[in-house]
């Protein structure tokens, strides 16, 4: 199980990675878009890991037996929560006038960043 310090540090790393990748992916690279991607990439893993910590979800921390991609249910939850948060924050915020496909791609990029940070960095 992760303690609060690890949860915050992991969420901060996800925010940096998610925000940077959203900025590289979205045309125009507006600060509001980068910021929304970063906030979503923080909120998703932070909320998910707090839920696991308070519910005692130790069984979610079992890595898959794939040496080059040891993903766990805990890692996957961080990606899913980030996808939901990014879709809402970007779609209702700075990308509200963009086509849904662009919003979905930007949200998926933020979620992939959070997932990869979760798998490989904490």
Image (spheres, rainbow, N blue to C red):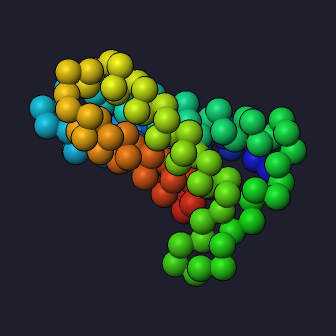
Q: Position of residue 53 (x, y in %)?
A: 80, 40
For the C terminus, give its image quadrant.
bottom right
Left-right relation of 68 to 57: left
What is the residue that sits farthest to the right in this orientation?
Answer: 56
Residue plotted at (83% across, 35% down): 54
Residue plotted at (58% across, 81% down): 67
Query: 14 or 115: which is nearer to us?
Result: 115
- Indicate the quadrant where residue 4 lies: top right
Q: Is residue 42 above or below residue 111?
A: above
Q: Position of residue 108 (x, y in %)?
A: 38, 46
Q: Is residue 11 above or below residue 92?
A: below
Residue plotted at (77% across, 42% down): 52
Left-right relation of 66 to 87: right
Q: Answer whether residue 70 is visible to the viewer in this image.
A: yes
Q: Position of residue 97 (x, y in %)?
A: 20, 21
Q: Position of residue 92 (x, y in %)?
A: 35, 19
């Amino acid at each position: 199980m992760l303690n609060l310090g690890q949860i915050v540090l992991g969420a901060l790393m996800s925010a940096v990675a998610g925000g940077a990748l959203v900025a590289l992916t979205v045309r125009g690279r507006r600060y509001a878009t980068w910021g929304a991607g970063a906030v979503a990439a923080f909120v998703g893993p932070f909320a998910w890991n707090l839920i696991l910590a308070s519910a005692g979800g130790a069984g979610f921390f079992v890595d898959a037996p794939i040496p080059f991609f040891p993903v766990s249910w805990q890692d996957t939850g961080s990606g899913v929560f980030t996808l939901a948060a990014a879709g809402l924050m970007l779609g209702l915020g700075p990308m509200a006038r963009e086509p849904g496909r662009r919003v979905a791609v930007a949200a998926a990029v933020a979620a992939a960043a959070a997932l990869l940070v979760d798998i490989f960095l904490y």
